[in-house]
Amino acid sequence: MHCEPTANIQTLSGVGSIALVGHPNVGKSALFHQLTGQRVIVSNYPGTTVEVTRGSARALPGVPLVDTPGVITLPANSEDEKVTERVLLLEPLQAILQVGDAKNLRRTLLLSCQLAEMGVPLVLALNMTDEARLRGIQLDHASLAEALGIQIVPTAAIHRQGVDEVTLALQQARTTQFQIDYAPEIEQAIGRFSARLEECVLQRPLISPRSLALLWLGDDPVIKEWLDTHLDEKSLLELSDLRLALQSTLGETPARRIQSTRFAWIERVANTAILESGARPAGLAAWISQLTTHPIWGWFVLAGVLYALYWFVGVLGAGVLVGYLEENLFGQVLNPAISQLVYRVIPIAWLAELIVGPYGLWTMGVTYALALILPIVTTFFLAFGVMEDSGYLPRLAALSNRMFKALGLNGKAVLPMVLGLGCVTMGTITTRVLETKRERLLATFLLALAIPCSAQLGVVMGMLAGVSFSASLIWSGVVLAVMLAVGWLAARLVPGERTLLLVELPPLRLPQASNVILKTLARLEWYAKEVLPLFLIGSLLMFTLDKTGVLAWLIKAGEPLVTGWLGLPPAASAAFLMGFLRRDFGVTGLFDMRIHGLLSPLQTIVSMVTVTLFIPCLASVMMIAKERNLRTALGMLVIITPFAILVGGLLYRLLLAAGWS
Amino acid sequence: MSDPVTCSMCGYRFDPQAHLACQSCPVNHGCQVVCCPSCGYQWADPQSSTLARFAMRWLKPAAPVNKNTANLSDKRPL
């Protein structure tokens, strides 16, 4: 059903708010902001850490709007879904606005039929119609409206298309008589549940008893909580028996039978409503796409990607480009000239050393940032841009999800891990998507322990490329093994319900060179702004420690561990100290030692593994403290640092026994 | 309203200027980082980078058109 915009907008007369409900990633928040403007209140839903946004509709004065968290399916599984369901169950609503994805009608209809069954006035905004049109998808909105008995409004919220029509449809929103006919046994159970509810509960929620019954039969935790507080023990027991008896009659869980009936209805409606389903990916791209997420071949593809990275970042970036910049330009031209100039202009020895001494702002801070890091991160950011634009990253998330699942970890934990490859600090924030405190703690710990950020990954790969490809494989193998072992152990210590990972896989495509270059330039500018000041502060810190004699003392104090246990030269202590400030700063210090022949291949691998397992950077420690608490952040620091040294030492002995030197 | 961007991780399209959290951030001014509101993936936005904007004079970014996209309906839950 299509709606025409009108200038004469009337206000809704009912009491209560309008809830926006939909799957994640369908543009629900975009439509919410179009309807409300900027004046909204974001707050945690009572008793949870899930954020709910509330505002008032601009064109419907006095009507509150609530933007609920995305739901994948009902009955609720995640904390987000529970909050959305609580809004539907407990808040006074005058209408529900479902925001659906026009590109994915079947998924949208699964939620539509459940919302329509609730008996609350409902409007469906089929969003992203612009993208659906680009893909050649055409829908028959009239047949959809007829099937559901509600108004369907096509929208493209991000372009403000269809927003006025949504407002108008909301004004005319009405309750639908829609219902799906389930198996007779289920219908009978629904009837008995509804009758019991009529008898025992005076203040029922707004949603229909039929819908409540279906949620109860689906073993929904929110409706269970609600019934626990509204029914006496005898009635609760009776309802539990009812569900158990139904399960034994059906030979499967009622939830499964209810869903399969809904799927059959969706198939019928979709077959009529989808006029054009759009082109499907085909040919070579589709074949490669399948290969990248294949449980076996996917890992071979990943190995190929890593090998390509090794050549591009390691051999070209860290070998050829660093060789030219560090050894030729800085080593032979710039640094000697600047040193000469500084010593001539500044007569105070310590001040001159502050600039061009061994820990000088120029010789360490600037040289590390420009001559060592810049060529490596440039090549790495170029490669990362290609991976992003080709659509490989979500496939990597899908592939690693299988591994996480095999370990018994929550599927959603994959996302923060893969995001951590971009920036561990941001990955730490993303652990919010996990449902329980234990899962969030576990994912944060794994991130802090074993996930190197993009900049660090680039420098590590560059440095290991100077040794050999097998060195890169040993490093990857050890870090992966540590992550899997810790993850496996933690999953056993803190078991929890596994949830699905749902990511939209974009098509594999050939990246546009201009896009990749622009992204790389933007990343380089951001990296320079963030890293250069830190490198200068780090150099100043090292200079101060050196001049006060603290550095010499620390190196001596660290000798039993650094030299005795890890088998590294004593000077590596200084690099480890720098690593506390920022892991890639420490790695660069080690890289500098390697270039100057102070680290053997064996020592290079050991030092890289040890630094990788360190806490990523000060920013990430602060973020852990913010997201969890200071005690947790300090606790992780206390656990991770000795653990990193322990693994490094064991690896040293293992490689030594294997004949490495 | 600025041009919508597409997240490389989850494919979500959004307007980076419409972020309420960003607008209330005290260090938002000059911030180059875009964060996907759907999955949390972040990247440096070429539109906010002086270097990238300068390079745009010679390099025109290609329009993000998602044709023939595989949807969730094409994949079974992992």
Image: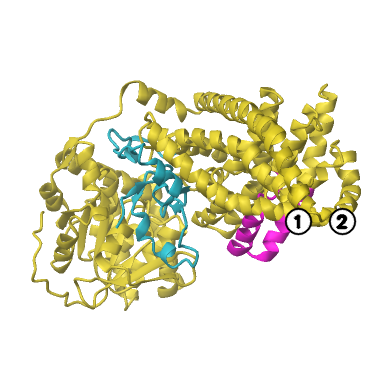
Residue drawn at (45%, 56%) of the image: A78
A299 and A361: which is toward the camera: A361
Q: Position of residue A55 (x, y in %)?
A: 31, 72
Q: Nearer the viewer, residue A76 or A253?
A: A76
Quarter of the image where the N terminus of chain A is located: bottom left
- The crowd level at tag 1 (other Cα within 10 Å; few <14, some 14-19, many 20+) is some
Residue at image point 33% right, 54% down? B15
> Does label 1 or label 2 sit earlier along the sequence?
1
- Report x, y in % for residue A513: 40, 31
Circles 1 and 2: CB distance less than 8 Å? no
Q: Which residue is mark 2?
A: A550
Q: Which chain does yellow denote in the image?
A: A
- The location of residue A629, given as percent across then percent down, is 64, 65
**Residue A530 drawn above or below residue A131:** below
Does residue A474 appear left or right of residue A116 in this picture? right
Q: Quadrant of residue A265?
A: top left
Rendering colour (chain B): cyan
- Number of other residues with Cα within 10 Å of mark 2, as a class: few under 14, some 14 to 19, many 20 or more: few
Magenta-highlighted residues: A613-642
> Which residue appears farthest toward the front when viewing the image?
A344
Q: Determine which residue is flagged by label 1.
A: A541
What's the residue type where badge 2 is placed? Val
- Nearest the viewer among B12 and A273 is B12
Judging from the image, the colouring scheme is by chain
Alpha carbons under labels 1 and 2: distance apart:
11 Å
Q: Is residue A147 magenta?
A: no
